[in-house]
Image (cartoon, grey):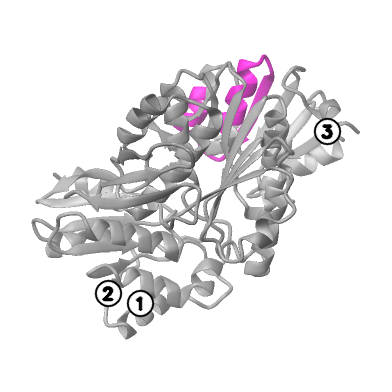
Amino acid sequence: MNTSDLFSLDKPCKVHFIGIGGISMSGIAELLLSRGFQVSGSDNANSPLTESLTQKGASITIGQSSDNIHSDMDLVVYTAAIRQDNPELVAAKEAGITLMTRAEILGLIMKSYKTPIAISGTHGKTTTTSMISRMLLAADTDPTLSIGGILKDIGGNFRVGNSELFVTEACEYTNSFLSFFPKISVILNVEADHLDFFKDLADIRSSFHRFAALLPADGHLVINGAIPDLCDITDGLPCSVTTFGMGSENDYYPTDIRYDENAYPTYTLNRPGQAPITIKLSVPGEHNVLNSVAAMAVIDILGLPTQVCLDAISSFGGTERRFEYKGTINGVTVIDDYSHHPTEISACLTAAAKKEHNKLWCIFQPHTYSRTKSFMSEFASALSLADSVILADIYAAREKDTLGISSETLLEELKHLGTECYYFPSFKEIEDFVIKNCQEGDLLITMGAGNVVKIGEELLSMK
């Protein structure tokens, strides 16, 4: 069956979302509402996203039940987080309603645009997508945007535009990005992660190769030239390939990198066939230098005005939960960061070390038992870049504790490295410890993909 017979933006119908309050699902629902679709959905709790959708015409139920599924629905959309025994999913199957994953419907939406852009990689997707989005907005291209975090410029994670440009993050987990139809793709990096789904790094690399191979002959791939055995991913592709990275062997590369007191970098961007340009960023760290280099490569492919885009990327202050300044309490600066993989942690703490401070504290909440077990020693090594580490319990997310590891296991690894480290089973105990021990001039980072952000917010509420 032709995919357009299953779903097309030009054919409004009745669509139900299981888990409509998710950051990506809510954005898709918003887009469909703007195109005249009848949208319904369910979630476990109200949120600003569900309230916004309700105001725009969606019918949302809190709590999931088979009663929410009706035979006149044309399509039911669900995410990888939805279990197969979910009552709504079971009811939809029994009713014979067409089912699609979030990735499948997002892929079909992409087919409706002339220039879909997909940003992938183990790290940096949200920041790079946001950088590109901000430059597209500044250049008045009126894009449709789907971002994995909150971009202040659009007051959310999704923007419905009226041009042929569509920009989205492309996540490799459960091979979601293989359902996409990009014209321009970015691969920022390829490392081991999501080992609860992938067998090993070779399996992950194979998935990224398949993602790159989705590009048509007139498409473009922007890829990090430092990825080991790059040819395994790029060989045989019909599209144009542009590399970026730290060395002059790449098409796009930075030189003369220097940092100010906030760890914000300024550098010279070298581009093929064009004069070098100076870029000053308002986000910290070498990892953001690379993110911005990749973003500028995309801008050049699109042929957008350089100066307008330079001004936009230079004033980009990041997205929520990406080295986000939360406030100051008793002279202690509080930063929140989403890092939950050893490479991300290392990049974040390396950037933090360049920011003026006395002592660097990191409150880390490990994310999922499988990731914590797979990267135990790597987590310890990365976290040891902080002067002192405070560990919260593992955030289980989609998993159950069946692997016999805990934050106390990580505590022992850190102590073996000689790192000052503490573990507390409750957020309240962590907050009490911080109040007693952090001193004026210290830098405190709450870190992880779970709810660790609440610790910093609670501390700041005590002012």
Q: Which residues are the magenta region?
A: 26-52
Cβ–Cβ under 8 Å for marks 2 and 1: yes
User: Can you tell which mark lies on residue 399?
Assistant: none
- Please give the residue where the numbered disc 3 appears in the rendered image: 97
Q: Residue at x 44, y 77 (%)?
A: 377
Q: Is residue 137 above or below residue 330?
A: above
Q: Is residue 248 above or below residue 291?
A: below
- Place residue 422 in its image quadrant: bottom left
Q: What's the distance in space between the residues labelled 3 and 1, CA to CA?
A: 49 Å
Helix, strand or loop for disc 2 = strand
Q: What's the distance in space between the residues labelled 2 and 1, CA to CA?
A: 7 Å
User: 75 left or right of 225?
Assistant: right
Helix, strand or loop for disc 1 = helix
User: Can you tell which mark lies on residue 421?
Assistant: 2
> Front-most of 427 and 36?
36
- At label 3, counting other C-alpha atoms closer than 10 Å, the crowd grade (few under 14, some 14-19, many 20 or more) is some
Q: Which sits earlier in the primary sequence, circle 3 or circle 2?
A: 3
Residue 38 in the magenta stretch? The answer is yes
User: 55 left or right of 96?
Assistant: left
- Give the quadrant of the C terminus: top left
Q: Which sits earlier in the primary sequence, circle 2 or circle 1?
A: 1
Q: Pinpoint residue 17: horizontal percent, then vertical percent.
A: 66, 33
- Place residue 72 in its image quadrant: top right
Q: What's the distance in space between the residues labelled 3 and 2, CA to CA?
A: 52 Å
- At label 2, counting other C-alpha atoms closer than 10 Å, the crowd grade (few under 14, some 14-19, many 20 or more) is many
- Please give the residue where the numbered disc 1 appears in the rendered image: 411
> Front-most of 192 and 131?
131
The residue type indicated by label 3 comes to: Ile
Q: Residue at x 37, y 64 (%)?
A: 346
Q: Residue at x 48, y 25 (%)?
A: 304
